[in-house]
Image (spheres, grey):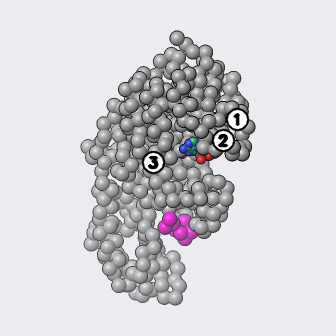
Amino acid sequence: MVKKTIKVGLLGLGTVGAGVYRLLQMNGAQINRRAGAQIEIKKILVRDPGKKRTTEVDAGLLTVNPREILHDPEIDVVVELIGGVEEARTYVEEALQHKKFVVTANKDLLATAGTGLLQLAREKGLNIYYEASVGGGIPLIRPLKYCLGANKIARIMGIINGTTNYILTKMSLEGMEFEAALAEAQAKGFAEQDPGNDLEGRDAAYKLCILAGLAFSSRVRYEDIFIQGIGGINKRDILYARELGFTVKLLAVGEEFAERGLALRVYPALLPLTHPLASVFYENNALFVEGNAVGEVMFYGPGAGALPTASAVAADLIAVVRNINHRVENGIMEADFEQKNVVPVESLSSAFYLRLQAQDEPGVFASLATAFGKENVSLDQILQKRNVAGTAEIVLVTHVVEEKSFNLALNRIQKTPAIKRIDNVLRVIES
Ligand SMILES: NC(=O)c1ccc[n+]([C@@H]2O[C@H](COP(=O)([O-])OP(=O)(O)OC[C@H]3O[C@@H](n4cnc5c(N)ncnc54)[C@H](OP(=O)(O)O)[C@@H]3O)[C@@H](O)[C@H]2O)c1
């Protein structure tokens, strides 16, 4: 039986929840037309119903009791926008147990508990929609799942954390120091007061779990992702990178190698200034996908914010309503994914950038070349950048080498008496 009205319970009325509420008011007629039914928000779970909110909401809709949503037989869809893992997981499980479809924007939840939740949804003949979990308003989930589903994808490479991209853009375009750029990101609300998840790469790794799973039809575990954050990046690294024809970006990279498996890494890298991702600035996000039929495709746009994220959540609502009324989508394809092998990071290959401090004396370049040569690491460029009180700053770029060999060469360099300190090591994307 086709329902004329689909009742929805919202969990959360923060940035995204209020955005969804506002968007349903703003574009309600069009959204309902596309959904083929009236979407009605019946209840909204919050922590503090007395809180002053920027979006005006009928106080009668608010509740602090999750059961009023999760156990209400009239509610068909639960939209989880509270964030975090434990409570969100309990509520999503309970919603599925009570035969409700789920829409969520929660990447932490999906990356850590997604497999089990999707399995449960499948067992119950339901579905979980999560377009807003990665890249805010940028369509990424459906394109990877369906539109590019006929391709073998060799690589996905994305800028999927707005906070770090904002900081690196400020350092790169305006010459800001890291701390000042972070403080500005926090003042503008792009970075949390505790920005650890963003700066240390964990947020991007959660998102890579979701994207790589869909791109490579595999279950992807967060623990299998190599993660390096942007904490060690200095303004001079960005300056030198530019002189060499590169910019520095925090990248989430997933690759599939025939017969070897998946490579899953989040790291700050030197990226050629000519690469399409090099011109993704400030809080914007983008994903670059290489498919064997489509070629190279890039998705670009606002990776967060109330209305951009609400745009993705409301699109999921349109899909879920059509699913409820017409069974347009049957089965959850993610539940069929096997877990593919993951290649250890030491056996992957990359070019490297290295910045170090050495005594300014004859023979230093030769001893560096010898240390690299002994591990079969060949150098592309070696430059002396400045000299302060007898200490020379040296920048090196290697050709592509196996990470294991590079690390052995690095050990040798650390033991070379003329080398005072290694300041930074970054991977280099060549194309
Ligand atoms: N912000 C973005 O731009 C963005 C972009 C993409 C994805 N996301 C994801 O969207 C989700 C929501 O993010 P947000 O920025 O909207 O968060 P937020 O502003 O912190 O809002 C969270 C909301 O959930 C409510 N809440 C939290 N814990 C609760 C609990 N235990 N019981 C009842 N209510 C609870 C809060 O109630 P009170 O209002 O009463 O405190 C608040 O309304 C997260 O998973 C986030 O990762 C956010």
Q: Residues within 10 Å of mark 3 (few under 14, many from 20)?
A: many
Left or right of 20, for residue 86: left
Q: Which residue is mark 1?
A: 59
Contact, mark 2 vs mark 1 (Cβ under 8 Å):
yes
Q: Which residue is mark 2?
A: 49
Mark 3 or mark 1, earlier in chain: 1
Mark 3 or mark 2, earlier in chain: 2
Q: Which quadrant of the view contains residue 156?
A: top left
Nearest to viewer (mark 3 / mark 2) = 2
Q: Which quadrant of the view contains residue 38?
A: top right
**Label placed on residue 318:** none
Per the picture, the main secondary structure of the magenta-coloured stretch is helix
Mark 2 or mark 1, earlier in chain: 2
Nearest to viewer (mark 3 / mark 1) = 1
- Label 2: element kind: loop
Left or right of 17, for residue 83: left
Is 233 drawn above or below residue 56 in the view shown? Answer: below
Q: Is residue 212 magenta?
A: no
Is residue 112 at least partly visible in the picture?
yes
Q: Position of residue 195 (x, y in %)?
A: 55, 58
Residue bounds of the magenta highlight: 231-240
Q: Which residue is mark 3?
A: 206
